[in-house]
Amino acid sequence: MVTIWHRAPDLSRGALVQGHRQVVLVERFNAPDTVQITAPQAELLPLMQAGHGACVVLGDGSVISGVSVQWVRSSTTTATVTLEADTGVAWRRLAYANPTQAWASQTAAYDRRTGPAESIALAYLDANLGAGALTARRLTGLTVPAGSGRGTSQTRTARFDVLGALVASILEPDGLRWRIVQTSPDSPTLTVEVTQPAPVPAARSLGIPGYGGPGLLSDWSYEVTRPAATAALVGAQGELTSRMLRERLDGTGALTAWGRAEVFVDQRQTDQSAEADKAGDDAVADAQPVVKITASIDEPLPVGALVTVDLDGVQITERVRSLTTTITPQRTTYKTVIASVQGADLDMDQRRLLALDRQARKVAAQ
């Protein structure tokens, strides 16, 4: 069961959307969720306006909220509206080197922060979207909580990174999931939620018929792609023979299994070996082998949870990267992507933003 309320630009609740023929929810781990609604045109007209959106209340009471980013009308009696979750705003903002200064007045080289993963992720969000941001950059109605200091301690530097991608990369190592959401259609406020999905118990491991527990897979595929790099050769500050050079190697077993594959990482902006090493480690981590399982499942899995899949006796443990729920008046079906971070189920727009973020990092290093 799903209930859909129109939402005005000021986050106030509008009319109930009724008679929907199909609702497709794509929930993603640390990337914006999307919702596609097909319903009679008259029901969707309020949503088909710039800045308008909806609160989608699921059967368990959880909410996906967002704005309309595409709508399609035709000569038929139905229309389709696509919503992007409010989290998507962070993927359209940059993390300023100095968030307290306007763009044309930037004087700092980097915004460097140290602390537990959750704390620094929330700090970047507050400084670039929340109450700590310049007035023109604040997201209407957003409250960024203090958090509880979860995650390992780390030091991060930001210089015009895509904010959403930066926050996701900070929280990924500790399995923390974040999103921006309007928790109730009746409360015109947005908040940042950070949660830690619990692993799916081994007793509920997935498998094809004859293997695994009660969650049997159907219509599944399993994909493995070799790593793009297993050795990062980092060049920090200095010229020619005076340049600081660092080497960072894969430590997960990919180097041994797949062999040496080198990538150059330009870090000429720093003379700190720790920062250069971190950039090299990140480059190797980003280039890890792609492991991706796509499957139809009988019941939903918590997005972000670690789950064990048994394929012909071979066990793979990876994270639930996305859950697609298709709801029609007749039935509800589920499809999931269980993958390494490199196999995350992003849409084309999110992949484009990640590509821009990587290019921005290269430019910042020059």
Image: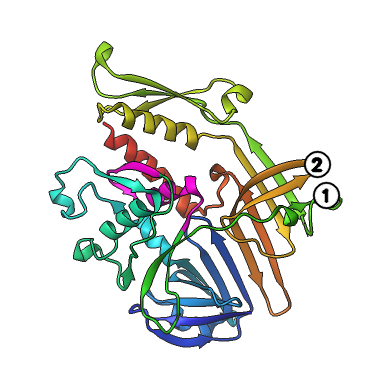
Can residue 93 be seen at all in this image of the molecule? no
| Pointers 1 and 2 in contact (C-beta within 8 Å) | yes
Colour scheme of this structure image? rainbow
Horizontal placement of 248 versus 220: left or right?
left
Q: Is residue 121 visible?
A: yes
Residue 340 lies left or right of residue 363; in this view the side is right
- State the residue in front, 63 or 174: 174
- When asked about the image quadrant of residue 304, the answer is bottom right
Q: Which residues are magenta?
A: 153-177
Percent of width and height locating residue 286: 48, 37
Give neighbour class at mark 2: few <14, some 14-19, many 20+ (Cα, 10 Å). Answer: few
Label disc, if present, on residue 211 of the rendered structure: 1
Task: Locate residue 130, reporting x and y percent.
Answer: 28, 64
Residue plotted at (37% across, 58% down): 90
Q: Residue at x 59, y 28 (%)?
A: 254
- Name the amino acid, label 1: Tyr
Q: For the N terminus, which image quadrant?
A: bottom right
Residue 235 at what x, y percent from top left?
33, 23
86 or 316: which is nearer to us?
Answer: 316
Residue that appears at 47% across and 77% down: 55
Residue that sits furthest to the top in the current view: 241
Name the residue that disc number 2 marks: 313
Residue 159 lies left or right of residue 89; in this view the side is left
